[in-house]
Amino acid sequence: MEDVAESSEKKPRLDTLSASDVTVESPLDSVVPPESIGGSSSKPPKVDSKRQKKKKQKHVVPESGTSEDVIFQEVITLLGKEVVEQTIADGMEWTAPFELREEVELTISSMSSSGEALATAPSSKRPWVVVVPFSLPGEKIRARIYRHGRMYSHADLISVDEPNPEMRDMSLVKCKYFGTCAGCQYQMISYDTQLDLKRNVVVKAYQNYSDLPQSSIPPISSTIPSPLQYGYRTKITPHFDAPPKKLQKKGAIESEDKPDWLKIGFNQIGRRTVMDIEECPIATPVLNERFSPLRLEIAQKIFTYKKGVSLLLRDSLEIPGGNLPTPTTAIADPVDALASSLEKHVCITDHKATVRERVGDKLFDYQAGSFFQNNNSVLIPLTSYVKDAIFPPSSSAVSSASPTTEQPTHLVDAYCGAGLFAISLAPHFSKVAGIELSADSIRFATHNAALNNLPDGQCSFRAGDAANIFQVVSDFPADRTVLVIDPPRKGCDEKFIRQLLDFRPTTVVYVSCNVHTQARDVGMILRWSEEGEKGRYVLDSLRGFDLFPQTAHVESVAVLRLVT
Ligand SMILES: C[S@@+](CC[C@H](N)C(=O)[O-])C[C@H]1O[C@@H](n2cnc3c(N)ncnc32)[C@H](O)[C@@H]1O
């Protein structure tokens, strides 16, 4: 897509406006009962006057790739570039045409990449967009405005007055908190449609963020499904607030039951308020089994907490000898470890304890508080897909962009965590190097190489910034080296991309939980690779993976090949 900012000559640029001080109200503490999203209406919520404190807030243009910026790009698509530029030129982009708590009737136009619905404001108002959860294209709804952004306002859904019968099927909903909890957006949509929506997010991200011509973006295939669509989440982090000060002062007596004021669960949609949640159907069974007794244990000692707490529940295989905080440094017989690892699942709540997961014929240990992918059921499809992208399974599948018939022999795993990609792919390479910021994860990656019986010296892992890996692998032959990148949501930094281009591996597989920053980085890699004479990268394939069914999240895998 053309850069809107570049195309405006005298008008202010969309991305360079200064911050201004304005007075806003904090969001209301309102609740949309789940039944209202099926088509009936609800009463206005009670308004807690204490929560309506006025506060000063600066309006800052959101950084590229953040969720606010992603919505703003969608506002531009919906309202049109000219209209948005004119509104900015008039200095009105932060001035909503709605009062807070105003109720509006809307017709939904499209879905945002965050899984909410977008509607343009009624024609009696200035051009503006309203963002509403749990609504679908074509539906007529009533909503209540609670917060303003840049040319858009967030609203609570009050009722769906005319549902979209082709997309909405409330009989699919499996959670009693759906419609109030912030966790899931899509339970009322068929799984095939969820996958289509996620494909569309990848399409839009590359249109809005890559700055590449359409001809450089390959057709984006259908999103790869998760084998499990419920009961898949191997990690949940419910939280609770400390007891209210007045109760702490009274020194309230500990009781066997959970007091009504104590909410242990997840955030309410659009709010920072914690909802009381007893079970989460997208979490694995072992996590749900542990959650009820854990809630009671917390309730019984709630007055010992002076601050709010985030709990951790991780699904793990039971490790013979116990899921101890330190991995066994010496693994006497790794083959035995693989064979004897118990397949019994347990719930780990200690951040320092060791969690074990199986991915195909590999075992991965990691510290419970560290990063590991949260949907074990999709990890074989994901790692197999990456392997097939590196070594296309049949000659007919070899891309025309493939520069050489020689097979890659060396693998670099940047942002490697506990070694998921490095260790899964190691049998196909003679040398593997991984880098990762977390020293704990690196300790486990090294341990996992031994646990999986990989030959001594084949894999090396080091703690540090990803950009440092290129000094370490200076003896790797670039034309036989594959680079896997799996950075956090903010993506790679410029230093990393410059070093990548100095090294120029034959294939780059970029796995990302934020397709917007991925699109930005891939765009940079492709454009900058045209400088110099070391060969340029082409985007060979691009595909979404569904790691989080029932939610709007999509993981994206981009495969880049070097061509001369
Ligand atoms: C999305 S996770 C991927 C981990 C691993 N590839 C996996 O699938 O389990 C991103 C990882 O990058 C690490 N990280 C964040 N910033 C980094 C940096 N500047 N350099 C290296 N690693 C970084 C995080 O600690 C985290 O483990």
Image: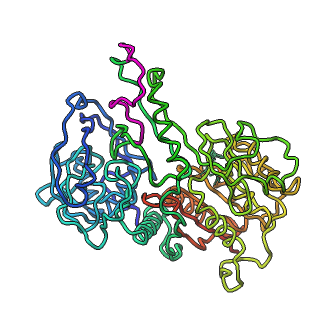
Q: Is residue 243 above or below residue 271?
A: above
Residue 116 vs residue 487: left or right?
left
Q: Main secondary structure of the magenta part?
A: loop
Instruction: Indicate yes or no whether the magenta region holds residue 251.
Output: yes
Magenta highlight range: 248-266
Instruction: Indicate yes or no whether the magenta region holds residue 116.
Output: no
Looking at the image, which residue sits at the far bottom? 396
Q: Position of residue 563 (x, y in %)?
A: 68, 74
Q: Is residue 142 above or below residue 218?
A: above
Residue 560 lies in quadrant: bottom right
Looking at the image, which residue sits at the far front? 256
Q: Is residue 178 above or below residue 237?
A: below
For the N terminus, which image quadrant? bottom left
Q: Position of residue 357 (x, y in %)?
A: 67, 53
Residue at the (24%, 38%) spot, across then down: 28
Residue 526 vs residue 104: left or right?
right
Q: Nearer the viewer, residue 348 or 413?
A: 348
